[in-house]
Image (tube, rainbow, N blue to C red):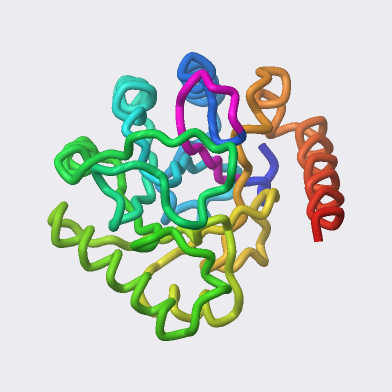
Amino acid sequence: MPAGRSFILTYHSLDESGSPISVPPAVFQRQMEFLSGSGMPVVPLGEIRNRPGSVAITFDDGFDNFLTGALPALHRLRLPATVFAVSGYCGGRNDWPTQTPGIPILPLMDWAALREVSRQGIEVGAHTIRHPRMTHLSTGEMEREVSGCQREIEDKIGKPVRSFAYPYGDSNAQARQVASRHFDVACGVRLRYLEAASGPFDLPRLDAYYLREPFWFERLAAPAGWGYIWARRQLRSIRAALLR
């Protein structure tokens, strides 16, 4: 992989529903086996900016199916990953007020499960208390969502929390400033590879929903993959513009 083409993968739920947040567990496991044998360094999220040509693996929301769909493969293949937990919903379901219609409502890991995955070497990051759209909040509300989530996760798992993901990838200058006061890195959902100019508090990620076909996943480090991600980004921009 050429220098500068590092990327961060984003997963949510590992299930068979076919929803926009879902990847089948068998697909995920094949992807991890490919990465393990590819020679591409799979690194902790906090190292991604300093390791050209590397990959980081992240999971948003902390779905309970991580325990059976992801953890065994990650442990077997010795791959690091980060799970971003919504502290106010741990042990509940992803039925927060801002949830998108049509998304499956599924169980989330409880604190005991998060402690266990942390014990097994998975990083637990923060994803706010209530999963709001950050740009709809005042600066004070942003601070409470971010710092409150960080403190509770640290209290429950007994480890520092150094990474953050903006719910829906929704951030602005104020949100990024708040994140920078508490974390080493923060992730959005811009469908891009990392570049030299990628700031630590708005890291782009590649949504695994677009990568379920092995042909494209296995070409992420090649020009064909770069072109595919560019095309998906253009289509997503057009859809977003039509919905305004």
The image quarter containing residue 116 is: top left
Residue 162 position (above or below residue 64): below
Residue 28 position (above or below residue 91): above
Give the x, y percent position of residue 171.
Answer: 58, 69
- Residue 11: within the magenta? yes
The image quarter containing residue 125 is: bottom left
Give the x, y percent position of residue 210.
Answer: 68, 32
x 34%, y 62%: residue: 129
Q: Which residues are magenta?
A: 7-19
- Residue 100: within the magenta? no
x 79%, y 40%: residue: 232
Left or right of 54 on screen, residue 14: left
Left or right of 158 on screen, residue 27: right
Left or right of 1 on screen, residue 150: left
Give the x, y percent position of residue 242.
Answer: 86, 54
Left or right of 63 on screen, residue 39: right
x 50%, y 22%: residue: 28
